[in-house]
Image (tube, rainbow, N blue to C red):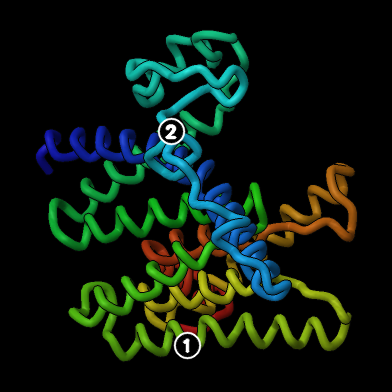
């Protein structure tokens, strides 16, 4: 494999990783603002008031989205120069602190960039330069964003899970990773499996054990990999979730009523299953004596 393409993929992954940090931080804020506006609009209509007079359109100065305003320090609000946005390097040069106010910068920012860069370089090294590699990069980036948003907000936004699901079905209509038949059943079974667990748990305990976003994420993973991958994903995610949850309880960082996001475990298990699922299945069958 040409090392030029691997290095290029590494750089691309680092740059995209920097953008992913922006999406992880801003997308939930944008969604919350949109939901708040919709609720206010609905209540105004219910009260017979004029929405136009009560909630004017935001001016350009108050617009907030992925692209605007420019990157700034969340502590001192001062703009961040372009050279301070160089992936990983700027974090190391600045010693993990803001250029202006010296507030600490979370290690998560360079870590996301590093994970994105290494994953992209590995994908190109393993699969070469082709369309399927690009698709897998997008798949990886989306799982990173979903995982961290779920950790921060216990939220798996439809604006990410549903396009991921439809992308899997569309890509596999050309049989890139599995057949369209397997992808469709993977999406259906992925959703219905967790949906069934959700309702069974709710009927027995009168509590909600997971969110609807988890159903959609597993459906998306099934659409990308086919229904055959679902058992490995569910088992791996459940094992990791149980282990992490137990550690959190034993370390007194959480209580029994604390919400533990399941999305990151699904995403991690899905990514692992994509590349090593068959090896895991074969190892398990060999372990239990089924050849």
Q: Position of residue 71 (x, y in %)?
A: 44, 28
Q: 286 and 184: which one is in front?
A: 184
Per the image, the residue denoted by label 2 is: 69
Q: Residue at x 39, y 67 (%)?
A: 164
Q: Which callout, 1 or 2, points at the residue further toward the start of the chain?
A: 2
Q: Which mark is residue 188?
A: 1
Residue 81 is left or right of residue 244, and the answer is: left
Classify the position of the N terminus by image quarter.
top left
Q: Is residue 148 visible?
A: no
Q: Residues within 10 Å of mark 2 (few under 14, many from 20)?
A: few
Q: Position of residue 115 (x, y in %)?
A: 42, 40
Q: Residue at x 22, y 56 (%)?
A: 133
Q: Residue at x 10, y 39 (%)?
A: 2
Q: Is residue 100 visible?
A: yes
Q: Secondary structure at mark 2?
A: loop
Q: Is residue 258 above or below residue 273?
A: above
Residue 32 is left or right of residue 71, and the answer is: right
Is label 1 or label 2 in front? 2
Q: Which mark is residue 86?
A: none
Q: Position of residue 228 (x, y in %)?
A: 43, 82
Q: Residue at x 80, y 48 (%)?
A: 248
Q: Secondary structure at mark 1?
A: helix
């Amino acid at each position: 494999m040409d090392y030029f393409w691997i290095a290029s993929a590494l750089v691309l992954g680092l740059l995209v990783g920097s953008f992913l940090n922006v999406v992880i931080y801003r997308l939930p804020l944008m969604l919350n603002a949109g939901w708040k506006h919709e609720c206010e609009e609905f209540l105004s209509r219910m009260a017979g008031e004029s929405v136009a007079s009560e909630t004017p359109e935001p001016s350009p100065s108050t617009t907030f989205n992925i692209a605007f305003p420019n990157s700034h320090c969340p502590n001192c609000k001062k703009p961040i120069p372009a050279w301070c946005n160089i992936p990983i390097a700027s974090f190391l040069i600045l010693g993990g602190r803001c250029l202006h106010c010296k507030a600490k910068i979370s290690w998560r920012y360079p870590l996301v960039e590093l994970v994105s860069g290494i994953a992209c370089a590995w994908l190109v090294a393993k699969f070469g330069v082709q369309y399927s590699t690009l698709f897998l990069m997008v798949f990886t980036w989306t799982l990173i964003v979903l995982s961290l948003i779920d950790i921060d907000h216990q939220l798996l936004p439809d604006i990410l899970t549903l396009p991921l699901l439809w992308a899997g079905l569309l890509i596999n209509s050309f049989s890139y990773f599995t057949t369209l038949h397997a992808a469709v059943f993977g999406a259906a079974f992925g959703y219905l499996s967790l949906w069934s667990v959700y309702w069974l748990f709710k009927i027995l305990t009168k509590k909600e054990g997971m969110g609807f976003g988890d159903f959609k994420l597993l459906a998306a993973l099934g659409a990308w990999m086919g229904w055959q991958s679902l058992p490995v994903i569910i088992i791996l995610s459940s094992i990791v979730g149980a282990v992490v949850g137990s550690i959190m309880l034993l370390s007194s960082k959480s209580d029994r009523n604390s919400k533990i996001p399941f999305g990151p475990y699904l995403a991690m298990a899905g990514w692992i299953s994509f590349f090593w699922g068959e090896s895991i299945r074969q190892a398990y069958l060999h372990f239990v004596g089924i050849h």
